[in-house]
Image (cartoon, helix red, strand yellow):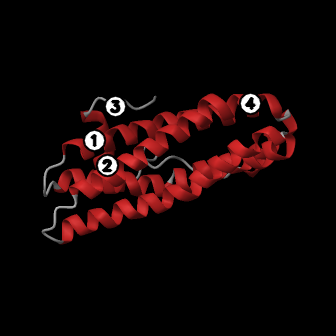
Amino acid sequence: MRDHIIQRLQQDHRNILRILSLMRMQIDFMSVHDGHALALISNAMHYMQQYPGLMHHPLEELIFDRVESEDDALVRVVTRLRSEHKEFPLMEADILVCISEQLGTDVDMRPRLRELGNAYLDAQGQHLQTEDVDFFPLAQDILSLAQWNQVYQMAASREDPIFGPQALARFDNLYDALMAAGLKLPH
């Protein structure tokens, strides 16, 4: 179970990095009223709210709970990761508001959108790096197989709305843009 859970989380991270890479391209090259770029960024934020925010992070939280009870030295890392899990939805909401303002007015919100977007992308990148390099390997060593089985039993099973076998039509433009950008999907 441990390997299955870690592999799932790492695959999620690779998929999230694809979305974040596409988002960075859109932020870097968008023009004043680039509806296509704004739609992709908006859909990326909705994806991040719907899958990582509702499925991926809760799975990680189950692991955090068990690691905290086993290793006091990791409490600080877990506290920071949990704090970031709470901060990401706020950042996503700010980005969505900025996109709405860009679409709804003649005011050029691109500088603000770039600022918010780059802060979000940097925070997500650092977060994923910490989990993959620092946290997951330690969690694998610290938790018993019984604890991993508990996590597996408690984890909700929901497919990724872009990368899963039953992708949602709402994210078709993200899928198409990922493919066009050469950000290949896993098989």
Q: Which numbered tag is attached to residue 66? A: none
Residue with the mark numbered 3: 183
User: Are the two marked residues, 3 and 2, in contact with CB atoms closer than 8 angstroms?
Assistant: no
Q: Secondary structure at mark 2?
A: helix
Instruction: From this view, report whether residue 50 is shown above or below residue 4.
Output: below
Image quadrant containing the N terminus: top right
Going by the image, does 185 lie left or right of 31? right
Q: Earlier in the sequence, mark 1 or mark 3?
A: 1
Residue 80 image point, x, y percent:
64, 48
Secondary structure at badge 4 equals helix
Mark 3 or mark 4: name the one nearer the start of the chain: 4
Q: Position of residue 31 (x, y in %)?
A: 14, 50
Residue topped by disc 2: 172
Q: Residue at x 19, y 42 (%)?
A: 29
Q: Earlier in the sequence, mark 4 or mark 2?
A: 4
Q: Tags 1 and 2 in contact by the CB under 8 Å rule?
A: yes
Amino acid type, mark 3? Leu
Query: Residue 34 vs residue 99: left or right?
Result: left
Q: Which mark is residue 176?
A: 1
| Real-space CA distance between mark 1 and mark 3, rounded to the nearest whole angstrom | 10 Å
Label 3 Cα neighbours within 10 Å, binned few <14 / some 14-19 / many ≥20 = some
Closer to viewer: mark 3 or mark 2: 3
Q: x and y percent of residue 68 in the render?
A: 80, 46
In the image, residue 125 above or below residue 53: above
